Image (spheres, rainbow, N blue to C red):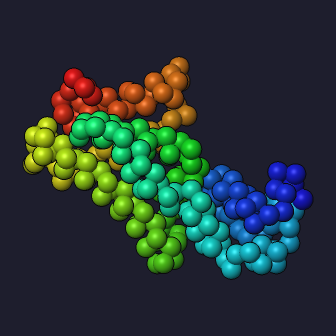
């Protein structure tokens, strides 16, 4: 057994994250997960009925709680701009913390069963709704044109997802500096000004 994967159920989940991120969902088998953890295939099936059950366990421990964590990050903020900025920053931080998992969910979604797709879409919709709600708050404060509101949430999420996909190619800046620039870019796109400007 690999020293990295000591023998718990959680170690199977961690091994699955490693393999799914490296080889994709379709490119990873239960046999691969058993091999890397030094277990038998039947031992993996003792904990998980199939590969998708492992995928759902990854979702549960990483991304499923993201909408609640994003809401919590916005609570102390005062005003629409501050709440929106807190939302974007928290989303970037959470996505960085679960970078491999986020990659798995976006890239390999088409491989899932209808039930797995429903769970994934529900979480994505919750996050999209948070952005729509906060853009609605900016609209109420008359900072955003109502004509643009329909696509703004998707555009903001596109910026965040683009960064997550290509972040390894951004050199010379700290994570905090990159996040500051992304927040500035998003605000300038939404409001035609920088945050607090």
Q: Nearer the viewer, residue 68 or 171?
A: 68
Q: Residue 96: x and y, percent?
A: 53, 42
Question: Residue sitting at 85 percent across and 57 percent down?
Answer: 6
Q: In the rendered image of this protein, does residue 23 appear above or below residue 168?
A: below
Residue 70 image point, x, y percent: 41, 49
> 150 left or right of 112?
left
- Between 61 and 79, the one nearer to me in the picture: 79
Identify which residue, 48 or 29, lies in the foreground. Answer: 48
Residue 18 in sight from this viewpoint: yes
Identify the residue at horizontal 65%, vertical 68% (top origin): 54
In this picture, residue 144 sits left or right of residue 110: left
Residue 147 in the image: state x and y as whole percent.
Answer: 9, 48
To which quarter of the image does residue 81 belong? top left
Q: Quadrant of residue 45?
A: bottom right
Decide if residue 147 is on the left or right side of residue 112.
left
x, y percent for residue 22? 66, 52
Outermost residue, right direction?
1
Q: Is residue 59 above or below residue 162?
A: below
Residue lying furthest top: 172
């Amino acid at each position: 057994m690999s020293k990295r994967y000591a023998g718990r159920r959680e170690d199977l989940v961690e091994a699955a994250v490693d393999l799914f991120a490296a080889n994709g969902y379709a490119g990873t088998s239960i046999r691969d997960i058993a091999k890397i953890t030094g277990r038998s295939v039947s031992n993996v099936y003792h904990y998980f009925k199939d590969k998708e059950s492992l995928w759902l366990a990854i979702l549960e421990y990483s991304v499923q709680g993201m909408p609640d964590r994003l809401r919590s990050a916005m609570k102390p903020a005062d005003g629409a701009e501050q709440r929106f900025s807190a939302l974007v920053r928290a989303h970037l931080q959470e996505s960085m913390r679960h970078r491999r998992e986020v990659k798995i969910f976006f890239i390999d979604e088409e491989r899932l069963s209808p039930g797995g797709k429903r769970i994934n879409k529900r979480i994505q919709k919750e996050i999209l709704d948070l952005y729509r709600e906060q853009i609605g708050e900016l609209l109420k404060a008359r900072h955003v044109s109502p004509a643009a509101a329909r696509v703004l949430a998707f555009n903001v999420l596109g910026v965040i997802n683009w960064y997550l996909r290509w972040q390894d190619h951004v050199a010379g800046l700290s994570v905090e500096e990159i996040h500051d620039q992304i927040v500035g870019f998003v605000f300038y796109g939404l409001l035609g000004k920088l945050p607090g400007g």
